[in-house]
Image (tube, helix red, strand yellow):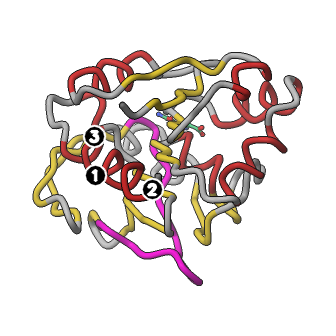
Amino acid sequence: MMRIGILALQGAFAEHETMLHRLGAECFEIRQKRDLALPMDGLILPGGESTVMGKLLSALDCLTWLRTYIQQGLPVYGTCAGLLLLAKHVQGGAVQLGTMDITAARNAYGRQLGSFSTTAPMEGVGDVPMIFIRAPYIQATWGEAQALATVDGRIVAARQGNQLVTAFHPELTEDTRVHRLFLEMVQKAN
Ligand code: GLN
């Protein structure tokens, strides 16, 4: 059975747990450095506040470890703030893990426009309901990163090898397909 670590310092991690349980995957919460020593087939970085998460990760001495795991190929799925943690360039915020060839624009829709819902096609998934909450978007992808979905001309999902990001929150919907895509990535990686 697959074991997914979910970063649980702050933000919307419980909803990811529910989603993974629905799909039959096992998961555990990462709250401190010693949790990183547990066997882990994949990692989820949830939505929340990327600045706060980044500060906590570095205070707990987890930032460097997580970066190394991801660079070594640990499959990771970042939603919203999680996307910001993975971006190599961040407009309006600091670079944290910086493992993915994307430029992310933080709080770039403005306060109201960053929160909305819509349905749009995502490559490899089909039409998905997308909930955005003070969301970032991806201004550019380069190198190995590939855009998987756009809304109003802005990139809102991307993949680079074992790294998957969405600016929206599938864990706040009933639709399990994005998480299923991530679990397929995990399965192929192991
Ligand atoms: N605005 C948040 C940030 O900058 C992201 C919002 C979210 O994760 N829902 O980290």
Rounded to the nearest angstrom, the CA distance separating label 3 from label 1 is 23 Å
Q: Kindly check if marks 3 and 2 are in contact, taking CB atoms under 8 A apart as contact.
A: no
Residue identified by numbered label 2: 164
Q: Residue at x 52, y 48 (%)?
A: 76
Residue 156 vs 174, above or below: the answer is below
Residue 136 vs 66, above or below: the answer is below
Circle 1: residue type? Leu
Q: Residue furthest bottom?
A: 143
Residue identified by numbered label 3: 116
Residue 8 vs 134, above or below: the answer is above
Q: Secondary structure at mark 2?
A: strand
From the viewer's perspective, is the residue at label 3 or at label 2 nearer? 2
- Local crowd size for mark 3, using a 10 Å CA cut-off: few (<14), some (14–19), many (≥20): few
Instruction: Tell me, yes or no, whether the highlighted magenta stretch contains residue 35.
Output: no
- Residue bounds of the magenta highlight: 133-149
Instruction: Mark 2 or mark 1: name the one nearer the start of the chain.
Output: 2
User: Is 157 displayed left or right of 9 in the figure?
Assistant: left
Circle 2: residue type? Leu
Q: Secondary structure at mark 1?
A: helix
Which quadrant of the structure image shows residue 24? top left
